Every structure is written in C-alpha cells, then in structure tokens.
Image (tube, rainbow, N blue to C red):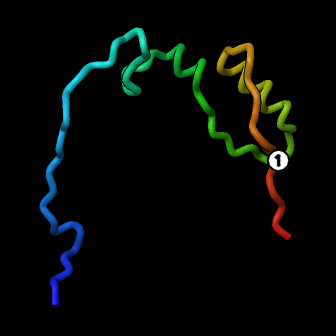
Amino acid sequence: MREIRAPWSIKRELLTKSEDETDPKYGHRPEERPYPDLIKFGIINLDKPPGPSSHEVTAWVKRIVGVEHAGHGGTLEPTVAA
C-alpha cells in the first residue's frame, strides 16, 4: 500500500516561467496602486447597522470618501432572525 503523506511534509518549489514587468500604461501592481485609483475603482465592504436607510449610508460614504458617484449592490438592510 502507498504511503499517504501530510501536505505540510511535502517539499515544494516555486516554478517561475518568466519574469516580466507590467507596462505602467496598463495599470499598477496592487500594492503600488495610487490612492485616487483605489477610491475610483474600489469596493467598500460595509456592515450596515439597523436604522439608517441604504440611501443614507450611500450618501454618507460619498461624503466621507469625497466622490460624486457611489452605489450599492443588493440590499443593505440587515436580516432579522425569526
């Protein structure tokens, strides 16, 4: 019978097919992305408390972050356990 080894005991190595740099005109590496791009193309994961409407929270986010356009996907209303 073949021995089954634990995944952490297997010696692995990283294989790199090629080293290359991204042309800056096509974007930035995630860790080097400028702040305005993060705001422009970013997503805010928000846990909305009960009380304010989704529309109110979206308006607050727009004001705090300083952008003209923002929206939400789906409902921001909390679910109530039965």
Q: Position of residue 57 (x, y in %)?
A: 79, 32
Where, quadrant-wise, is the C terminus in this rendering?
Answer: bottom right
Residue at the spot x=49%, y=17% of the render? 35
Instruction: Give residue 70's quadrant in the image.
Output: top right
Of 15 and 52, which appears nearest the observer? Answer: 15
Q: Is residue 53 left or right of residue 27?
A: right
Residue at the spot x=15%, y=56% of the render? 12
What is the count of numbered marks?
1
Give the residue pinned by disc 1: 77
Where, quadrant-wise, is the N terminus in this rendering?
Answer: bottom left
Of 34 and 63, which appears nearest the observer? Answer: 34
Q: Is residue 1 left or right of residue 81?
A: left
Residue at the spot x=37%, y=23% of the render? 29
Q: Amino acid at mark 1?
A: Glu
* Residue density around tag 1, few if under 14, some if 14–19, many if 20 or more, within 10 Å: some
Q: Secondary structure at mark 1?
A: loop
Q: Position of residue 76 (x, y in %)?
A: 79, 43
Of 51 and 66, which appears nearest the observer? Answer: 66
Residue at the spot x=32%, y=18% of the render? 22
Of 59 and 21, which appears nearest the observer? Answer: 21
Q: Position of residue 32 (x, y in %)?
A: 37, 20
77 is higher (above) or lower (below) than 34: below
75 is higher (above) or lower (below) than 24: below
Q: Position of residue 24 (x, y in %)?
A: 37, 11
